[in-house]
Structure formats: C-alpha cells, structure tokens
Image (cartoon, helix red, strand yellow):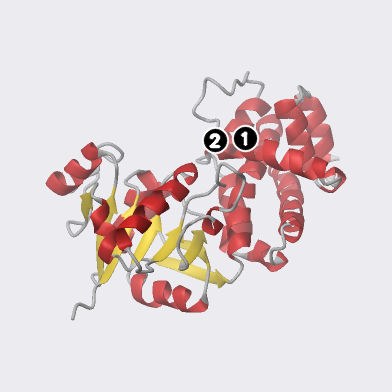
Amino acid sequence: MSTENRIVVAGGGVFGTSIAERLAWNTDNQVVIHSIEKDVVATINAQHRNVKYFPTRFLNRAITATDDYEVFRDAECIFLVIPSKAIVSFSEEVRRHVGDRQPLMVNLAKGMSDDGAFITEKIPFAHTASMKGPSFAIEVLNGIPTAFTFGGEEADYRYVKDRIFPGTSLMLDHTHDVRGVELTSILKNMYAIAIGLVAGRYSSPNVEFLVYTKAVNEMRRFLSLYGCDSETIFRYCAIGDLGLTGLNDLSRNRTLGMLIGKGFDYSTGNTATLVEGHRTIRLFGETTRERGIADQFPIVQALYRLMYEGSSLNDYIMSVVS
C-alpha cells in the first residue's frame, strides 16, 4: 500500500506553482498541479518549468501537471490556489469527479465569493479548511521559511503539519476559527492600502506604525462583528499577514496606496494595481454604515470617502493620523 500523500494543487499560477514546489520537497508527497492553462501544463511536464510565470526557474522533477479533472478522483488533499471568485464553481466541478469521497479541501485564496459569503462556507465539501499567512510567492518558491495559519479541525491540522509539511520549511499555527482566518486575509488588503497612503505621503515609519496599530484594532473589531474569535488577530493570518502586506513594498495593495499618497492619479479601469483591497473597501465601508457602526471604523470610512466619494487625500490623512 502506498504511503504517499496524494496532493493536487489547483492552480498553476505564481502562488500555486510556488506551493507545489515546496510541497514536493517532502518526498512522501505526490504533487500534481491542475491548471486550465494548457501551455502551463505542457511546459511543466516537458521542461520541468512553468515558462509562463517563472521562465527561468526549474521545478522539482517529481511535479507533474494536468488539465484533466480526473486527477482529483484519488486526491487526499487539494490545495485551492485559484482566484477566489472561481473557487465555488471549480469546487462543484471537482465534486462531480470525486463521487462520495471527501478529500481535504484547503483554501489558500484570499477574497470572498461574489455574493459576499466566506469561500470555505460555499465549497460543497464537508472536509474544508483555510490556510493564510505572510507569504510572498517568490520567497515561497525560493525556499525561505514561511508560516501560515491553518483554520480547521485539529485532525486536519495535524495531518497537514505532521505528514505533508515535514521537510518543506513551511510552518503552521492553528485555530478552529475558519471564518476568522478567511476574514483577516480579506481585511489585510484594505488596510495595506491605508498604510500605503500614509507611506506615500510621509515616508515615515512613525506614521506607518501609527496607522498599522489602528488597523490591527479595527481588524479585531471586525472579528467580533462577524462572530469570530478575537484572538485570531494574533495569528500568522492576521497580524502577520497585515505586517507583510502593509509594510513591504512588494505588496500590490500597499503600492496602490503609495501611488495615491504620492499624488498619482488613479483610475480603476487602467491599472493592474487595482486588486483585492479596493473591492473590500466598498464592501466593508457600506457594511459598517448600514449597521450604524461607522464611527468604530474610522480608517475604513476614510478609505471609503477617498475611493468612492471624492474626498481629498488631505482629508484622508487628517482622519487617520489624528
């Protein structure tokens, strides 16, 4: 009987490829990348390279790739590393191929479904978890020690930690608060824009950490608002990921904030830097107003006024640093 952990990484993009590479460091893992991009599949299998996303990097030769959904039939663990808006429909397709089996579905995507629901709650499997943390893809690919929070059942956490992750330099902390892991990974993009705005204006660590500390407190209030464990704020998925995304110039959300803070004109229709945080600002700005608690979230409201109501950058700065 095989002792291999049969793993499928759903998504052959930058992060999916990076995660697959690290998982393959554990020789007990049989790692397959599932991708709808035929050129990605072809170059991984023929050249051991993902030419589209990492043209100069060779991958572990044990990694294979496919676009065939039959690969999920025998998978024990499926890491979902595809755009958040596609996960629900993708998971429904996977469900049709696995029959009554219940592989562990681990969501690494950061975002909400189109109807505003938490993704893990919409995946049509009983066996689900969420894994988020401070993790730039290129550093994952390069083998830098990287940590995530695993939100899910204790047994699933132990399975991933003790069987799948040994030898990968990937580390985990754990919480049963799956919704909290999902929520903080969404919020941190919005607050990274908030920190980037003051970074662009002041280029001052003092001001950045002023806003960072306020952001942590607002995130904790959101956890309570959505019935999550407020202690989740101290996990890798929250205070850790906010630090990475809000304080590092590799972050697209921080970069967006910095560009606006430096006075560059910004249009939602002409830049790839419009990313996760922009949509989040609208969602949570409107939610806090509808619930009559806008005054408890001054950063969110300042962002909403700036991005959607024509407020000035100066008004934003005065709102968040006072």
Number of numbered discs on residues: 2
Q: Is residue 289 above or below residue 9?
A: above
Quadrant containing the C terminus is top right
* Nearer to me, 170 or 161: 161
**Location of mark 1 (residue):** 278
On screen, residue 319 versus residue 97, left or right, reads: right
Q: Residue at x 47, y 79 (%)?
A: 155
Mark 1 crowdedness (10 Å alpha carbons): few <14, some 14-19, many ≥20: many
Quadrant containing the N terminus is bottom left
Q: Position of residue 94 (x, y in %)?
A: 35, 55
**Location of mark 2 (residue):** 275
Q: Are marks 2 and 1 in contact (CB under 8 Å)?
A: yes
| Amino acid type of the residue tagged 1 in the rendering | His
Q: Is residue 189 above or below residue 29?
A: above
> Distance from label 2 to label 1 (Cα)?
6 Å
Judge whether residue 9 can be spotted in this image.
yes
Quick one: which residue is furthest to the left in this view?
46
Q: Residue at x 62, y 36 (%)?
A: 279
Q: Secondary structure at mark 2?
A: loop
| Amino acid type of the residue tagged 2 in the rendering | Val
